[in-house]
Amino acid sequence: MEKKIRVLIAKPGLDGHDRGALIISQALRDYGMEVIYTGLRQTPEQIVASAIQEDVDAIGLSCLSGAHNELFPEVIKGLKAQGADDIIVVGGGVIPWEDIPFLEEQGIKKIFTPGTLSIDTAKFIEQAVYQRDGIEVKSEMELVEKIDHIGIAVQSLDDSLPFYLDTLQLKLQGIEEVESENVKVAFIEAGNVKLELLEPTSKESSIQGFIDKRGPGIHHVALGVKDIEGRIAELKKKGIQMIHDAPKPGAGGASIAFMHPKSANGVLYELCEKESKERL
Ligand code: ZN
């Protein structure tokens, strides 16, 4: 049975606006969590005391005053001093990107920015708590396992391969033709990531269209995933437009699906799930 997660939403410091804190409180409740809101202007000591008294699993700190670099670590220190550092602490509010690595180093599990969807915050807290409690975590946590390969459009494999194999001295893993896509594909090993050279085999190939429009060069980045159907569903739920709503066969015996670049900062991303028995 799934346990009900208890979260304390707290506003340390002096700022007087709690619209964001109230919104996230409601979103976590809608997600099925029990939420306690401390109200404005709490000291780190008060927050630690409330968290222990309410026996919460997690604390969400919200700070708009700019004092997050002092206040957030004080909460962590306070929890440690009380032997309550198994409580997961996340933060949000107006926090510059530059401060995020510092805060996460201090023990804040994750910093959410104003652009973060409430559903992502809720899921993160849920999975962090499950992980802490040794409850099996759904693979949603690992939307992306790794960068699998980088796709590069070339007009001719014969002309391009010497650069990779001779000049860069990389290893050719294999060449295959993917007839459905009108491409011939060469996989080259480059450390943990592969390069996928794509040569169009007909005028109808989308790779030929790409080269005609932009010239040869980087075409896509492939994200290695597990359970590609689940990942597609997850991304669509988050509002990402997919070029392929269902996986299709790609090179190397993989199942693949592309995200629309409009949804991905102008980059064409491929989701790529390798079968357990790789053909290459
Ligand atoms: Zn690819």
Image (cartoon, rainbow, N blue to C red):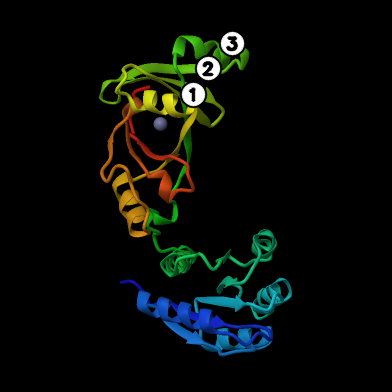
Q: Is residue 185 left or right of residue 161?
A: left
Please name which of the two marks, 2 or 1, marks the residue nearer to the observer: 1
Secondary structure, mark 1, is loop
**Residue 243 figure quarter:** top left
Q: Secondary structure at mark 3?
A: helix
Quadrant in which the N terminus is drawn: bottom left
Q: Which residue is disc 1 drawn over?
A: 216
Would you say 164 lies left or right of 219 here?
right
Q: Position of residue 190 (x, y in %)?
A: 55, 26
- Residue 83 position (above or below residue 160): below
Q: In terms of depth relative to the viewer, which is nearer, 49 or 186?
A: 186
Q: For this rendering, which residue is in front, 260 or 5?
A: 260
Q: Distance of mark 2 from mark 3, alpha carbons?
A: 9 Å
Tell me the kind of residue under disc 2.
Lys
- How far apart are the two marked residues, 3 and 1, measured between alpha carbons? 20 Å
- Residue situated furthest right in the rendering: 70
46 horizontally vs 200: left or right = right
Give, as a three-letter code, the residue at label 3: Asp
Tag 2–tag 1 contact (CB < 8 Å): no
When asked about the image quadrant of residue 26, the answer is bottom left
Residue appearing at x 51%, y 23% in the figure = 189
Q: Amino acid at mark 1?
A: Pro
Give the Cα distance between marks 2 and 1. Answer: 21 Å
User: In screen coordinates, is 86 left or right of 198?
Assistant: right
As drawn, 138 above or below 272: below
Mark 1 and ligand 1: say if the CB distance to the nearest ligand atom is below 8 Å.
Answer: no
Disc 2 target residue:
171
Q: Quadrant of the C terminus?
A: top left
Residue 255 spot, x, y in % from top left = 31, 35
| Callout 2: SS | strand
| Foreground label between 3 and 1 | 1
Q: Which residue is mark 3?
A: 166
